[in-house]
Each structure stands twice: as C-alpha cells, then as structure tokens.
Amino acid sequence: MSEVMPNWNLNDLYPGMDSPELKKDMAAVSAGALRFETHYKGKIAATTPDEFGKSVEEYEKLNETLGRLDAYSYMMHSTNMSDPEISTFYQNVMEKENDVSGKMLFFELELNSLTDEQLAEKMTSPVAKKYEPWIKNVRAARDHMLPENMEKLLHDKAMSSSTAWIRLFDETMAGLRFNIGGKKLTEPEAAAKMSDPDIETRHEACAEMNRVMKENMSTFALITNTLAKDKQIEDEWRGYKRPISARNIQNQVEDEVVDALVDSVVDSHADISHRYYKMKADWLGVDKLDYSDRNAPIPDLPEKKYSWEDAKKIVLSAYNEFSPEMAAIGKKFFDNNWIDVAPKEGKEGGAYSHPTVPSAHPYIMLNYMGTAGDVMTLAHELGHGVHQYLAREQGMLKSNTPITLAETASIFGEMMTFKYMLKHEQDPKQRFAMLAEKTGSMINSSVRQIAFHRFETEVHTARRKEGELSPERLNGIWTKTQSDALGPSVTNDDNSNAMWASVPHLIHTPFYVYGYAFGDCLVNSLYKVYEEGKVADFPKKYMEMLSKGGSERHQQMLKPFGLDASKADFWKKGLSVVKGFVDELEVLTDQLGMNKNKTQQANKTAVAAKQPVTLASAVKAATKNGR
C-alpha cells in the first residue's frame, strides 16, 4: 500500500472559494482602497508626520488583505491547474487585486516624489520611522518611476500582457503529458525520470521531454519573445540600461556585485563543473555523459529511497542539532498540514514555500517521490518556511526578503541536512554517493543557475538587437551557454536543446535565477564560519538574521559573521568549498574503485596478460593510459 502524504489545509487563509470570509475581504479591500485613494491621493506631500505615519499603516493593512487573497487563490490554482472552476476563480481574484492595487498606485509614486528634506521631516513620526527600511527600498527606484498616468496604464495592462502570458505558460506546462516507459507522465514525473538509475529510462525521458517541448515550441517561443519585448519596452521607458538592473534594485544589490558573482562562477567552470562531469562520465563508464546523465545516481549502488516519514525525521533532526528553535518552527508545518506533498494531475511542477501574510503563516508545496534529492528539497523549502515564519514579525511591508538573502535559509537548511545524513551513513560507498550527489546539487545551484542566467541575459540582449528570436536561435543560445558550463564531458545536442522551455523562473520572475548562486556561495562561506566556531552564539545570531526579513541589506546582515559580499574574494571563497568537494571526490573515486572507465581498461589489460584485476592494477593501467 502506497504511503499517504498530506495535502495542505488552507483554512487558515479562507475556508473556501465561496466562503463568507473571502467575500467579505474582497468587498472590504475594494472599499478600503477607494477610501484610501480619496483621502490621500495628491495630498501626501502636505501630510503632517503623524498623518504620514498613519497613511503607511493603512497602506500596509490593505496590502495584507490583498496578499491573503493572492496567496489563497495562487495556492489553490498551483495544485489544481486542470480545474476550470479554480482557474476562473484565480483569474477573477487577480483581476480584483489589479483593480484594487491600481487605486493605491499613487502612494508609492507620491512617496518617491518627496524631496529628501520633505521626507526627513515626515520621518520624525515614530510610526513612520518604523517603516524606514521599506521606504528606502521604495525610493531606491525613484529615478526610474514614470508619471502616474503611465504607471497606471502599465499596471492595468499587466493583466492582459505579462500576467496573461505567464498564466498561459503555467497552464500549458500543467497540461503536457510525456510518454515514458509506456506511461503518460506529468512534467514533474517526467523530470524525475531523468535521475532514474536505468540509463535507457533517463535517455528516453530526456528525449521525450525535449520532443514535447519542441512540439509546443511555437507557444513557448512566442511567450518568451513577448515577455522579453514587454520588458524591453518598460525598461527603456524607465531608463534602465541593462535588462538585469531593475531586478538588482529590487534585490538591494549593485550590478557590479552580481557581475562579480557571474564572472567568478564562469572562471570556476574548468576547476569545478568540468572536472566533476568528467568524473561522473568515468563513474558511469562512458566517454561522454548524455545531458540526462548529469543527475544520474552512482551506478552499482542501489538508490536509497526515503519514505515521507523518513524525510520528516531526517530534516527535523538535522535542524534540531543546529537549533531546537528552528526544529520547533519546522515541526509546525507537519503538525498543522501547512504542506502539500504528493505529485498529482494538474499540480504545478517543482517546489516552493509561499510566505502568504504575516497574520497567517507560510505554506510549502512539494512533488515528493522519495529520492535523496527530494529529502534535500524538503530541507530547502522548510528553510524558506522557517525564514518566512520568523520574518512575519516585520509586518507585510518589511518581511519580504530580497533574492540576495532569500535563498540563504533554504540552502543552509540543505547543508545542515546533508551533513546530518553523511554523519549517520555508515556504508562508505553510500557516503561517496551522498557526497557526489551533494556536489552535483551545489553545481546545479551555482554553475547551472549562472548558466541559466547567462542564457536569460543573452536572450534578452539578442531580442533587443535582433528582434524576435526563432526557436532555432533560442535553442542555439541554450546549447552554447550550457556547453560552456557543463564542459566537454557532457553532450548537448538535439535531444536537449529545447529544455530551456521547461525552466519556469525564466518566465515567472526574470533574472531571479542568479539568486540561487548568490545564496549558495554565501551559505558556503557562512557555513564555513559556523564550522570553524569563531563566531559566538552562531545559531542565535543566525536566527536573528532570519527574523529581520527585508529590513536590512546583505552588508548589514552578514556583518555579525565577518562576511562582506562586496569584497573581491567573497565569491571565490564560497566556490572553494565546492572545489574542495570535487577534490575529495577525486581521491575517493580511486580509493573505492568507483571509476568504471579505469576498471574497464584494467580488465582489458588483465585479460591480455591473463592476470586477475585488482584496484592497484586498475589505477596502474589508468595511469599508463593517461586517464
């Protein structure tokens, strides 16, 4: 009998789509926004400090109600995309939100139009002072704001432009089916087959996914081109010189810092990803890996499966070793069904943790299938959940964390769980497999995400210079950027060149993906500080950092740990941790005789010489042949 896995209970937001509570909030937020607009529009500059503070409080309350409606409708839709009634509900809520937020649009525009002197006078209000970090973040983009009528036009048209195209992407992906092994699978199920122990299954899954992406390429290429052009138009009107700049301002990070991250990762390719995939090809006994072999389990080792109960126990135990407070918060997600676990028809692929609103709590969505990677995904999303739970105390406007720190808790949670699992695994070969999988995962978070970022950057740049990009052009950019990152030991061909179309972040949130690499390198450095034990009360300071949400920039957040992301060597320090894992794997590969290519060569030598094969002879033969 298959294991029963929990579905989330969204009643803490609303009892149902037709509930009186939801209808009441829909009506109240509409009326509240109208009152807010009538009372404050055109008058912010003339408000007293106390009136200004009160206006920000009212703005926050309205956004909290909007956020609750948005979270509920989105989570309902993301787990039931094939249900037309829920899709209609989701669209109607989005349209209502768009109408309401349009009435409040003037507020941030007028806030940005205040002179520094005017703002300083208003900030003498204790209430206003409480919102200072949020006000600073809003005003960071003041030079790129447009006149109110243009801002209103862009805001209102979003429902029929970018938001509509994103919905088309999501519903198209949810409706796709992939014929693998004689079964019709959803996208998350098909993607999981690319990590199957059986090489033929992996290759079939990759070829089938690529085939289906190409079969629907006219839709995916149109969505990508349209969204890129939409962004170009808005960026040009706002005066952003680069496609990434708007995202960096939102993330509270300078363009130069992100450029340094990208350059450092690209410089590391030969020493990290190229070496790792060369080893992986040797482990699998092939000259070159197929694209689908990148995440293959180690051959000749039975893939360890983890029940849902196993995963819960492992992750909570790992969290508890670091901080009992963290584990206690994490346990709430399981005890109260704040988590939706199993894959199903119509459910969005991947995983996420949704912060919802401070007056409620976060929710986690997974597609759990029992692999070690799925355990790590649980650890990752639970890290997000704990972070979001702690940040609630900052309130609606200050709890949202920029990408520069949003992935910190999630990747830190993964590292804690990995270290815990490694410590409790006694089988040397399973420990080797865990280290190999973790190294591959870290490469996926750093090297691969920067490769996605470079693909995205080249697509937006080419779209601006060349006009609409053909599917072949998009596929070519993908192949080039992925080949650069993965190296000569991985095949990138017609069986994988359309896989870019399955990456949702490129559609949902342009220029988000570098945040994973930012977080991975940051966490590597942070975890190194923790293991060195040089910072007193590290867990306490870490939890305090998470509780600050978006109220401080990354420089302030990292100061208690002696780290500074603006320093030239910061990224190389983080990447050195991954390189250290690759170095260790090279040693263990020979020690444990995991190199199939060397063993095969030794077999041939032994047969020719009529002598038995030993690990020593395998190493000797491999050395002789320049391996």
Image (cartoon, grey):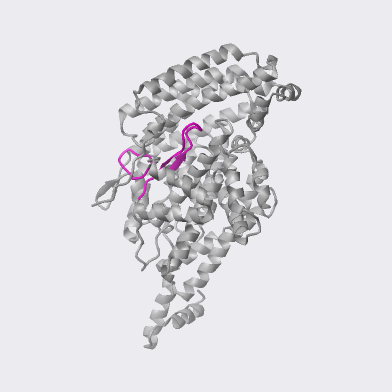
Residue 169 visible here? yes
Asked if the magenta segment contains residue 205, the reply would be: no
Which residue is most to the bottom? Answer: 610
Q: Is the magenta stretch mostly helix, strand or loop?
A: loop
In the image, 116: left or right of 303?
Answer: right
Which residue is most to the right? Answer: 117
In the depicted view, which residue is nearer to us: 401 or 280? 401
In the image, 455: left or right of 194?
Answer: right
The percent coordinates of residue 575 (x first, y second) are 59, 57
How many discs appear? 0
In the depicted view, which residue is nearer to us: 311 or 535? 535
In the depicted view, which residue is nearer to us: 171 or 22? 22
Quadrant of residue 72 in the image?
top left
Asked if the magenta segment contains residue 344, the reply would be: yes
Quadrant of residue 512 in the image?
top right
The percent coordinates of residue 93 (x first, y second) are 41, 24
Quadrant of residue 403 in the image?
top right
The percent coordinates of residue 230 (x first, y second) are 52, 29
For the point 34% across and 54% down, the residue is 307
The percent coordinates of residue 141 (x first, y second) are 65, 30
The segment highlighted magenta reads 340-368
In the image, 194: left or right of 626?
Answer: left
Residue 481 visible here? no
For the point 45% across and 74% down, the residue is 592
